[in-house]
Image (spheres, rainbow, N blue to C red):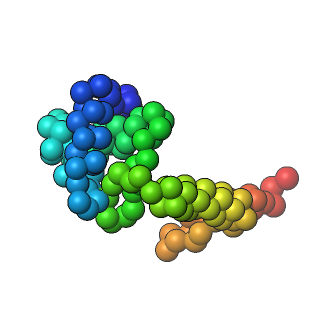
Amino acid sequence: MNRPTITTSNAAACLAILKAADAPIVAADLAKRLGLAGSRESRRRQVREIITHLRDQGEWIVGANPGGYRFTNDLIVWAEYNADRANNGKRVIGQSHNRNTAAVDSRGQALLFQPPVSCGAG
């Protein structure tokens, strides 16, 4: 899968939209305002790439599900947002690291991870 192409004009337009907004904007609405093409998920992916690019350039754009993205000048809001992102990453890594058994579904798929059973022919 190719990464979406980010243009300077798309990044600038996105930043202008976010700075002018009174409330957070969801990715689908941003994509529509930017005139991005493709499927719904493709457009959302393009918006995420633009937001990541803008953050990498030092713009303070915070996001929340289901609220959307918004620009902030508030250092406290920016710091809390980054602290929440760091904590969430640690939590996810911790959960996956501590998981030592596979989930069992109705078809017994966890059996795929158990040692093979001998048939006695050996």
* 6 sits to left or right of 108: left
Horizontal and vertical percent for residue 66?
33, 65
Task: Name the residue rendered at 58%, 71% in the picture.
Answer: 104
Task: Name the residue rendered at 22%, 45% in the picture.
Answer: 17
Can residue 119 be seen in the rendering of this structure?
no
Between 20 and 40, the residue placed more toward the observer is: 20
Between 26 and 41, the residue placed more toward the observer is: 26
Task: Name the residue rendered at 23%, 54% in the picture.
Answer: 21
Residue 43 quadrant: top left
Residue 63 quadrant: bottom left
Horizontal and vertical percent for residue 27?
27, 51
* Residue sitting farthest toward the bottom: 106
Q: How many marks?
A: 0
Can residue 116 be seen in the rendering of this structure?
yes
* 33 sits to left or right of 113: left
* Residue sitting farthest toward the right: 122
Task: Name the residue rendered at 73%, 65% in the picture.
Answer: 98
* 85 sits to left or right of 70: right
Horizontal and vertical percent for residue 12?
27, 33
State which quarter of the image contains the N terminus: top left
* 82 sits to left or right of 50: right
Establish if 37 lies above or below 41: above
